[in-house]
Amino acid sequence: MGSKKVTFDDIARHTGFSKTTISRFFNNPGSLTRKNQEIIRKALKELNYKENKVAQILATGETDFVGILVPNLMLHYYSEMLNQILLTYPEYGYKYIVFVGSEDPQVEQDYIQKLLSYQIAGLIVMSHSTPSAQLAALSIPIVSIEREDIHICSVNSDNYTGALLATELLQKNGCDIFIHINTPTPITRPAYQRINGFRDYCTERGLRHELFIRETGTSASSITAAMLELFNEIENRYPGQKKGIFFSDDTRANAFLNVLLRKYHVLPEEYRLVGFDNSPIAEQAVYPISTVGQQIRLIAHETVALLHEKILEYRSGADWSAPPVHRVITPMLYPRATTDDGGQ
Amino acid sequence: MGSKKVTFDDIARHTGFSKTTISRFFNNPGSLTRKNQEIIRKALKELNYKENKVAQILATGETDFVGILVPNLMLHYYSEMLNQILLTYPEYGYKYIVFVGSEDPQVEQDYIQKLLSYQIAGLIVMSHSTPSAQLAALSIPIVSIEREDIHICSVNSDNYTGALLATELLQKNGCDIFIHINTPTPITRPAYQRINGFRDYCTERGLRHELFIRETGTSASSITAAMLELFNEIENRYPGQKKGIFFSDDTRANAFLNVLLRKYHVLPEEYRLVGFDNSPIAEQAVYPISTVGQQIRLIAHETVALLHEKILEYRSGADWSAPPVHRVITPMLYPRATTDDGGQ
């Protein structure tokens, strides 16, 4: 920068108003006539005063800060979503204050209070700690992604359709038994629909199927141990049958594939696998893993676009009691080496 | 929140000062006596005025915002570093405004200017677009991580020692020929020391070695194609010899391992591999990949601690022309299935 700081004296001299009037403009603009506010705003521009954003915020009550609450950045899904949200900066101009989840929900709630005190324009919530009813009570523009969203606006993947696509691909591969491996998931989370989609697809078509809901931990070694145990169970239960397995995510699909490869060195004909998320690990596996890809870039863009709409509504003083908007983005199937192409 | 907004009238009534004096406190606190400033600060606390951070910033010129510039969040290294920096919030209280790199360096530079106008307390820089001389000229506290840092403070991994550890492990595995695979890297980047460490280790011990510096792109498919090409070259050049390969990072090591597994289904005795970074992909590979782990959590903590020191110095008006501080964190070796244990 290097430009000299513009003082209230400079603005007073430039406009012909007293310093007290200039103070009033910043601290209580409504106490000045609209015309005088305009004169001062024009002077601020001419003096390049806009560079002191803080004074500007105080004058208008508006910032271009948006808070983002994310549960962690260890999962590729979250880091890529954050990446894509941050990349919207040139388009929307919002600056993002990012908070990564704490074990302690109180830390997140204190953080939200601090964000409010900075007069943030809105909030994007991916973390699960604060119920949507409590978030809605903050009365600021909020959009959530893939979390419980009863009382707040949201943009989610169509998890149900994603599960249908995955199971359909396994059916086209001529599997005898259909298996879904997932972790315990609250029914209010959008991702729960993966379980519903799998179950409904199999039930409606009379396909033999089984659901394995298992706690696996999040470390590579605990996931591998859990997948080895499941592999032994599945081998014992369905010998000689063609097993089509749909996994809750690519990390678990990859761990299961590695168990198979350590035992058989190649992917046996008897196993067909589909993951979820289209993470890099799916593409980088020895046998690139078929997967359902969430359109992360699109979800991020829809989220910021919806938040922007809500911020404009909020600022225009529009009716703030409208029911929350829920937008849904269709996921895409990526057939790869862990399935036959299913005629596609 | 829900607490009623405290106005200048309230503060004036509470302190017995005029509203003009209160205005002056916020806009030019130095024009009031120290004693009167204290009285108003006490009143602000009593009135719970602290919740309007913006006014507070204007009064003190101090924020607890720290800007973070990161080149991308697709590489696990960056997303995990960001994760660990954000997790320091409960300890230091800094709130992080995050910017993810743009193709266009001008976008980053405009963003920095905007951050300055918000009176951020400091800056953490991981992106490469802005030379350190230009960053130093901003005259605010800055700490960089793993980028050119001649004129600014930094915290880096000891890349040189990391390369020594990797090459030593390959030597203990009784390899005949030592290979380092890397991408074109500017000599001013800390990561360049991986090349130097490998070369020095081999030269000093008279080990036969070769350096392959190749552009590989960043997509899974372009990296795989580049590794396949290198594999063919290395097979032709060193048939029947035990090849010890040290890779610039785990992603490329994993792609090379997959090329081997697609051809041989097991890891041949003739190949020993070591990656760099200790990314999840190294641990999750069919043969978990030996690697040099950067202590990301420690680097993140050192970075915030050093920045915090610099911010306190800056605020105390201490000498600002001191030479930049460079701190170095020792990496750790993780021997896994792609090497023998090397007697450890």
Image (cartoon, coloured by chain):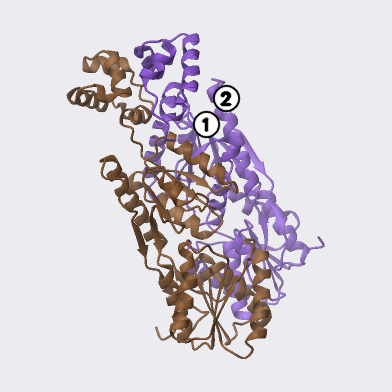
Chain colours: A brown, B purple
The answer to which of A319 and B186 lies nearer the viewer is A319
Q: Chain of mark 2?
A: B
Spot occupied by residue A96 in the image (x, y as percentages of width and height): 42, 44
Spot occupied by residue B101 in the image (x, y as percentages of width and height): 43, 48
Q: Does B160 sit above or below residue A238?
A: above
Residue beneath disc 1: B141
Sequence-wise, the earlier of marks 1 and 2 is: 1
Task: Count the numbered circles shown.
Answer: 2
Label 1: few (<14), some or many (≥20) within 10 Å? Answer: many
**Secondary element at tag 1:** loop
Q: Are discs 1 and 2 less than 8 Å apart at CB?
A: yes
Residue at the image point whose x is 53% and y is 86% from the top: A208
Judge from the rendering whether residue B315 lies leftward or rightward of residue B206; answer left or right: left
Q: Outermost residue toward the right? A: B343
Q: Residue B311 falls in which quadrant of the image?
A: top right
Residue at the image point whose x is 58% and y is 35% from the top: B92
Q: Outermost residue toward the left? A: A35
Please state which amino acid type lies under the numbered disc 2: Glu
Asked if one can make out residue A7 in the rendered structure from this viewpoint, the answer is yes
Label 2: few (<14), some or many (≥20) within 10 Å? Answer: some
Residue beneath disc 2: B313
**Secondary element at tag 2:** helix
